[in-house]
Image: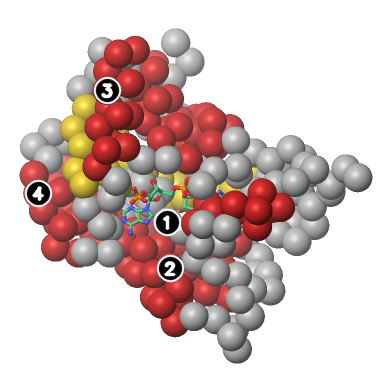
Amino acid sequence: MAFQRLKDQWVLITGATSGIGKACAFHFAEAGSNLILTGRRKNRLKEISKEIGEHYSVQIETFTFDIRDREACKKCVDAISDPIDILVNNAGLASGKDPVDQADFEDWDKMIDTNIKGLLSMTRFVSEKMRKRNSGHIINIGSIAGHEAYAGGSVYCATKHAVKAITQATKMDLHGTNIRVSAVSPGLVDTEFSEVRFHGDRDAAETVYKNMDPLTADDIAEIILFTASRPPHVNIMDTIVLPTAQSSSTMVHRSS
Ligand code: NDP
Ligand code: 8X3
């Protein structure tokens, strides 16, 4: 098996109800990992667990909560008695793509509270447990938007730049332990991301991936599993991965 080291590991994936998080759940299960899946949509967590259970004999726990609720994050982590070997900090969103002088404050709060504060809450509670065991791996989902900014992305890009900084600082905070800290930073991935960004406007969302081959959630899940399955002395700090048709946040080649 390609990812032998992941067998019997407990993996906590935030935002496992769709896109990259959901793909990770299936790929880790295929590698024999046990799963702790979180998200706000309870039905989705139920359906995904059922489907995984039909294909793979791994243990699955689910927790339904909003990652912006710090107490709920704590309750989830406190309730997990198994060791959390891998934390995939994936839950996140873009909300709106308006210029800074016209943007909606609620959109800004949503992105900051989810992508930065939610990720930090989970990291805070899980890393405390990992330090006690002197073992674990935290994998943060960043973005090309954490390496470059683009117009209309002031706050989303800021949150992903924050994820990059948090990844680097967390590695330093845990310096001298066996805990690994990584980021995976994708470009355009065809998930529910754009539909969420454009507040349910499917036409606007489809335009993002029109006439080009975007990455898929499976492409990113495979890189996350690769990152998680390196030998214990190998810590991949960050992987920037773009579709071949994308060369920067704003350069996307589209066939006519
Ligand atoms: P999706 O919209 O498909 O998935 C987002 C996931 O995050 C869902 O499972 C959602 O679950 C969860 N989530 C969002 N808000 C909250 C919240 N407040 N509390 C708990 N869970 C939440 O998008 P992607 O799979 O594309 O996004 C996953 C990550 O990848 C994000 O961090 C995103 O920024 C990043 N990314 C995406 C790229 C792309 O082009 N798609 C590129 C680069 C990075 P639920 O709604 O059930 O709560
Ligand atoms: C998602 C990729 O380019 O839409 O992080 O910001 S992008």
Q: Residue at x 49, y 33 (%)?
A: 221
Q: Residue at x 80, y 43 (%)?
A: 211
Dot label at residue 50: 3
**Cβ of disc 2 within 8 Å of ligand 1?**
no
Q: Residues within 10 Å of mark 4 (few under 14, many from 20)?
A: few
Which residue is tagged 2? 111
Give how far apart the Cα atoms at labels 2 and 1 are: 7 Å
The answer to which of marks 4 and 1 sits earlier in the sequence is 4
Please tell me which residue lies in front, 148 or 54: 54
The quadrant in which residue 168 appears is bottom left
**From this viewpoint, which residue is outermost toward the bottom?**
101
Which residue is tagged 4? 78
Tag 2–tag 1 contact (CB < 8 Å) = yes
Residue 181 image offset from top left, x and y in percent = 39, 48
Eyeballing the image, is 142 above or below 95?
above
Tag 2–tag 3 contact (CB < 8 Å) = no
Q: Quadrant of the C terminus?
A: top right
Name the amino acid type tagged 3. Lys
Which mark's residue is nearer the viewer, 2 or 3? 3
Kindly state the secondary structure of the residue where label 1 is placed: loop
Q: Quadrant of the N terminus?
A: top left
Please tell me which residue lies in front, 160 or 23: 23
Give how far apart the Cα atoms at labels 1 and 3 are: 24 Å
Name the amino acid type tagged 2. Met
Kindly state the secondary structure of the residue where label 3 is placed: helix
Q: Residues within 10 Å of mark 3 (few under 14, many from 20)?
A: few
Q: Image check: 154 left or right of 214?
A: left
**Residue 137 can be seen in this image:** no
Residue 172 image offset from top left, x and y in percent = 38, 59
Which mark's residue is nearer the viewer, 1 or 3? 3
Eyeballing the image, is 132 above or below 48?
below
